[in-house]
Amino acid sequence: AQSVSQHNHHVILSEAASLELGCNYSYGGTVNLFWYVQYPGQHLQLLLKYFSGDPLVKGIKGFEAEFIKSKFSFNLRKPSVQWSDTAEYFCAVTYSGAGSYQLTFGKGTKLSVIP
Amino acid sequence: GAVVSQHPSRVICKSGTSVKIECRSLDFQATTMFWYRQFPKKSLMLMATSNEGSKATYEQGVEKDKFLINHASLTLSTLTVTSAHPEDSSFYICSAPVAGVADTQYFGPGTRLTVL
């Protein structure tokens, strides 16, 4: 079965530090890739998505992600984190062949930013 | 952006009772909605796809008689946990795609179910 792996369960950073959260998926075919964020007490929100084209995708709040097909990866980055970035981050994938809206999620990475 | 609501946000019930959770798309119509279950420190697991006007499609391992899904209208899907047991305690989240916005779903805030 297709799967999504997020390498870090909990990341703790100081403000202004750079962030990179890893995400790998298992499917070798055509995929659409997403990063969702869940702030404390709030619902999941879309940060960014990749369907095709430029593999470097820019999202909201200064986040970006790079799709590297050869590595089956879609890592999330931010050059300088803020306290308000404290949240849980989920990588997700939709696969061609499944229903186009059926998301497969990673287990999530909790980010704690220390002021 | 599109808004999806869930009600209730939290529910505590006794073992053996049934609990209904509502998922509404507030400013758009959704012929399809998805129900997820989120365990602590685990990813969201798709339980079922709710289809307006037809039966829900359940993922492997999900008991359809235990988790009843009804997509009553283009803006409402309900999940009923029947004869709930403590192991059903979890965070249940619904989502809905917006027509014309390919592969993008909007998520509800979730419902925390605790079965005593």
Image (cartoon, rainbow, N blue to C red):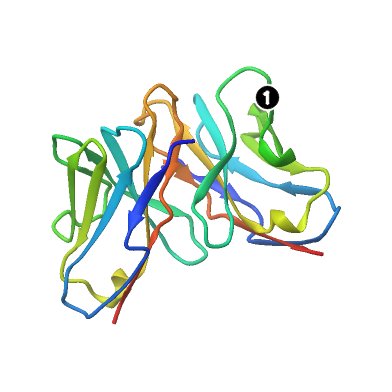
- Looking at the image, the residue that sits furthest to the top is A53
Q: Provide the chain ID for the residue under circle 1.
A: A
Q: Relative to A88, does residue A77 appear above or below in the rendering?
A: above
Q: Position of residue A87 (x, y in %)?
A: 63, 57
Q: Nearer the viewer, residue B47 or B100?
A: B100
- Looking at the image, the residue that sits furthest to the right is A16
Q: Residue at x 19, y 43 (%)?
A: B71
Q: Relative to A30, does residue B79 appear above or below in the rendering?
A: below
Task: Please give left or right for residue A3 compared with residue A18 in the image.
Answer: left
Q: Residue at x 64, y 37 (%)?
A: A73
Q: Relative to B33, does residue B13 appear above or below in the rendering?
A: below
Q: Position of residue B82 (x, y in %)?
A: 16, 65
Give the quadrant of the C terminus of chain B: bottom left
Q: Residue at x 70, y 41 (%)?
A: A61
Mark 1 secondary-structure assignment = loop
Q: Position of residue A44 (x, y in %)?
A: 50, 49
Q: Position of residue B62 (x, y in %)?
A: 25, 55
Task: Please give left or right for residue B70 compared with residue B92 in the image.
Answer: left
Q: Relative to B43, does residue B29 appear above or below in the rendering?
A: above
Q: Residues within 10 Å of mark 1 (few under 14, many from 20)?
A: some
Residue B83 figure quarter: bottom left
Residue at mark 1: A55
Q: Residue at x 49, y 53 (%)?
A: A43
Give the residue type that dot 1 points to: Pro
